[in-house]
Image (cartoon, rainbow, N blue to C red):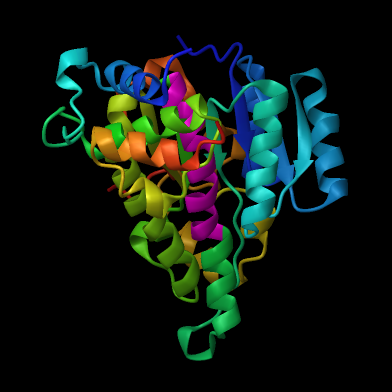
Amino acid sequence: MSTIEERVKKIIVEQLGVKEEEVKPEASFENDLGADSLDTVELVMALEEEFETEIPDEEAEKIRTVQAAIDYVTAHSEE
Amino acid sequence: MFSLNEQVALVTGASRGIGRAIAESLAAQGAFVIGTATSASGADAISAYLGDQGAGMVLNVTDAESVNQVISDIQKTHGGIDILVNNAGITKDNLLMRMKDEEWNDVMSTNLTSVFRTSKAVMRGMMKKRHGRIINIGSVVGTTGNPGQTNYCAAKAGLIGFTKSLAKEIAARGVTVNAVAPGFIDTDMTQALTDEQKESIFSGIPAARLGKPEEIAAAVVFLASPAAAYITGETIHVNGGMSMV
């Protein structure tokens, strides 16, 4: 089974249409991966579906980098 | 080009008047239509006139819980909403000098805040589908103003700004957001106008008659259709020439 990190990265690749090697932990969605604000909203929606969780708006706003997404899911995952 | 086959539409305030005409016209183009009313008897009446082509549901657009519940029920049963028509509206007319906070707040809540709520609730589904139509029913008086209706006109003008802003936000996802602004249409709402109001209005309508609810519905059907995919943020005025914007 894939790790959380792998699953998060896969979603980012799919949602933002970027190459896997670009999805570095420190990469910012908007500054490095070419996402606009609506793309990041959609990314959060995709994460919610993949991990069957609801990410509150105030938390979602903090998820701006690949690492932040991995950290959020790791902290809120039941596995 | 104008077919709405296999599309699911939600029309608020569909028990009578313009909302009913819109629900019937969308159904006639092949859409499955959910029409809402504030009462169970209203919802039953909608189910009755839509037959196999739709259903009535009870919805209070001023209640966030009710909105989210109804929209999530529709998504579960029918697989998401393709067309949202924000039609529910009320008037509580009064001269500003006499207008109570309640009259202002009720009209804002039912006519404007409701549009924010329903649109937000359908957004996720439409963005995922990369397709959607939101059509807000405004009013000519949102542009022209009307004495005794500061609350109603403010809400309807606000709706146009909302329409344009949301249209810009989500145009890249294949979702269009437009408004239809009726002039004076033959419904219960315009029956409630005073003779004095009517007289001054009629003298300003070049078509020299009231509009029919079906004439508003026709514009809504067009905006909902594949033919209107490149129109967004626009307000179509349907008013017999009384105001040309």
Q: In this view, does B101 lie above or below B193?
A: below
Report the side of B184 relative to B78 (left or right). left
Query: On screen, B161 above or below B240?
Result: below
Q: Residue reaching furthest left?
A: A31
Res B223 seen here: no
Which corner quadrant of the image does residue A72 belong to?
A: top left
Q: Where is residue B32 in the image (x, y as percent from the top left)?
A: 67, 21
Viewer can see residue B2: yes
Which residue occupies the foreground of this view, A37 or B173? A37
Q: Where is residue B168 in the image (x, y as percent from the top left)?
A: 26, 39
Q: Give the dominant element type of the magenta stretch: helix, strand or loop.
A: helix
Q: Does the magenta stretch include residue B120?
A: yes
Q: Quadrant of the N terminus of chain B?
A: top left
Q: Would residue B164 be found to the left or right of residue B111 on screen? A: left
> How many badges with numbers are in the image?
0
- Residue at left 74%, top 47%? B37
Q: Does the magenta stretch include residue B27?
A: no
User: x and y percent of residue A39 in the render?
Assistant: 28, 31
Res B106 quadrant in image? bottom right
* Magenta span of residues: B111-129
How far from the left and from the top, in percent, is residue B202?
49, 58
Side of A36 where B244 appears, left or right = right
Q: Which residue lies furthest to the bottom in this view?
A: B97
Residue in front for this viewpoint, B91 or A22: A22
Q: Residue at x 52, y 41 (%)?
A: A54
| Along the viewing direction, whichever of B131 and B219 lies nearer the viewer | B131
Q: Tell me what residue is drawn at x 11 percent, y 36 percent.
A: A31
Q: Residue at x 51, y 66 (%)?
A: B108
